[in-house]
Amino acid sequence: QVQLVESGGGLVQPGGSLRLSCAASGRTTTDYAMGWFRQAPGNEREFVAGISRSGAGTLYHDSVKGRFTISRDNAKNTVYLQMNSLKPDDTAVYYCAADRRPMATWTSANYQYWGQGTQVTVSS
């Protein structure tokens, strides 16, 4: 079992940047593909980005391609989401998730472990 804790959320102006972190404990992150999801009020939770166990494979939702970058530091048991050129539509609670499969997938039901979420608000 793994415990996940997100951090790095906050209020940022449109066009700004934030870096989210997801720290894992209990088991090493090398055992899991990792994903970031987000959920805005009134909306379903949606996939944002994913990364394979090794870090060699990444996956992005079309709406964040070219703006967001997912990465992992397995030595620190931490996964990151660098978010640039933020837009008001990016406002949501962002969740980190872990999946025992080697490759990240789009489907939230495939992920066994979830963090508590961190709020990102993009507003002027």
Image: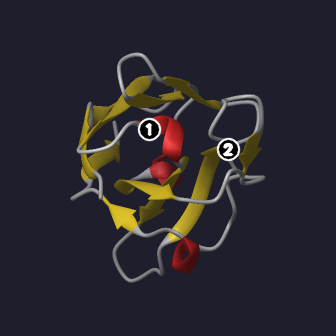
Q: In the picture provided, is 97 more to the left or to the right than 108?
A: left
Which residue has dot 2 on it?
A: 64
Q: Which scheme is used to colour this image of the protein?
A: secondary structure
Residue type indicated by callout 1: Thr
Please, is residue 50 above or below residue 15 in the view?
Answer: below
- Of pointers 2 and 1, the one earlier in the residue sequence: 1
Which tag is nearer the camera, tag 2 or tag 1?
1
Q: From mark 2 to mark 1, how far is it between C-alphas?
A: 24 Å
Determine whether the residue tagged by mark 2 lies in a helix, strand or loop: loop
Q: Residue at x 55, y 69 (%)?
A: 46
Q: In the picture provided, is 67 more to the left or to the right than 115?
A: right
Q: Which numbered tag is attached to residue 66?
A: none
Q: Residues within 10 Å of mark 1 (few under 14, many from 20)?
A: many
Q: In the picture provided, is 81 more to the left or to the right than 9?
A: right
Residue 91 visible in the displayed image: yes
The x and y percentages for residue 119 are 25, 50
The residue closer to the viewer here, 56 or 1, is 1
The N terminus lies in quadrant: bottom left
The residue closer to the viewer here, 93 or 26, is 26
The x and y percentages for residue 91 are 40, 53
Residue 87 visible in the displayed image: no
The x and y percentages for residue 99 are 52, 60
Q: Residue at x 45, y 22 (%)?
A: 17
Residue 67 picture quarter: top right
The x and y percentages for residue 103 are 72, 52
Q: In the picture provided, is 54 more to the left or to the right than 112?
A: right
Residue type indicated by callout 2: Val
Q: Which numbered tag is attached to residue 29?
A: 1
Q: Residue at x 78, y 52 (%)?
A: 62
Q: Residues within 10 Å of mark 2 (few under 14, many from 20)?
A: some
